[in-house]
Image: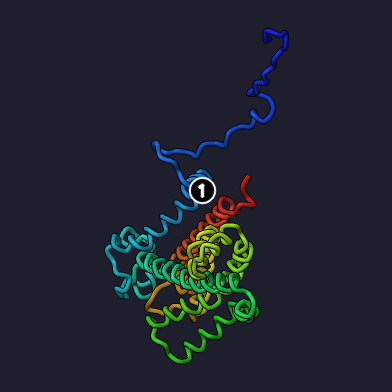
Amino acid sequence: MSGGGELIVTQVADPGIGPAAEAPAPAPRKRNGKRRGLWGDSFARLLRMPAASISLAALVFMLLFSFAGPLLTGYTGDEINLRIADHVPTMDHWLGTDSYGRDVLTRLMLAGRLSLTIGIASMLLSLLIGAVLGIIAGYYGGLVDSIIMRAADLLMAIPGLPLLIVIAAVLSANSVDPSTRIYYVMLLLSLIGWPSLARLIRGQVLSLREAPYMRAAEVLGLSSRSRQFRHLLPNVMPLLIVVATLSTASGILSESALSFLGLGVMPPNASWGNMISAANNLIDFQQHWWLWVPPGVALLITIAAINVFGDRMRDVFDPRMKK
């Protein structure tokens, strides 16, 4: 109250009422005193999911089993010893021997190495083609977009596995060398894999190209290539990671199907698919279970682990799944 009797009231914001009550934004999580970025926080959240942790552990085990395992067995996988052909599992041969006396465990590891390599290589190639064409189609639009998307639609209109079988049969008719054939299989899997990836990336780019940061990059005079691959590409990277993971499983499964039919990886090279083809023989199917059950189990574990891990990654990286 002033000397003239006037009452002066000063409004003091109550911490629990009105605008002052707005809670401050949560501080970024820190680890060992350092601020953890968006990627670190996302992967930490991913690893807290039991399904993701178990599937990742299974994938790491299969990678070590396939790439480091053959160094520890003491066999090369190509040693022929007909005296112990189709022998049951023993302490010397944990998964027995095949019809040529070769150690099945070693061949299972070598087959996993080849199947995983084909799956990963075909994924990387299809991802490269699909990402580049998808970004170009979504960014430029118009005639460029129409040409790329019509080519993708043409390939997607043809069933993938029948197309692979026809092309692989042509390779077989031309007696392509088994070692060279592996590279053809990778190219074929990439050929049928890039259209779906390109469409996904194009859709994402269409929603991002009008974003404020893209407008700012254009105003600043950045080149089209810089805007596409320095600003658009990092923002579609989470989608690329998820799609790449799931595409790896598809590549491994397609290669195994071709090899099972005798049109993919050919002997003497081993893959999980051509090892499972031993089940085509009734005697081997009934009496020599160790020839086809282990590769089937290895293929099942790998495909299931990749798909589960990919699904959990989609839950983490897809903004629509976040709470």
From the viewer's side, name the closer residue of 317 and 91.
317
Determine the image quadrant of residue 270: bottom left
Q: Badge 1 is on which residue?
A: 42
Residue at 60% x, 57% y is: 212
Q: Amino acid at mark 1?
A: Ser
- Residues packed near mark 1 inside 10 Å, few (<14), some (14 to 19) or many (20 plus): some
Query: Given the current orientation, which residue lies at the most extreme front position?
Result: 4
Q: Is residue 181 above or below residue 135?
A: below
Is residue 304 among what the camera can see? no
Residue 8: % across, % down:
69, 15
Count of residue discs: 1
Query: Given the current orientation, which residue lies at the most extreme left position?
Result: 74
Residue at 46% x, 54% y is: 58
Instruction: Identify the image quadrant of the N terminus.
Output: top right
From the viewer's side, name the closer residue of 68 and 234.
234
From the viewer's side, name the closer residue of 216 and 118.
216
Residue 51: % across, % down:
54, 48
Query: Given the current orientation, which residue lies at the most extreme bottom position?
Result: 174
Determine the image quadrant of residue 76: bottom left
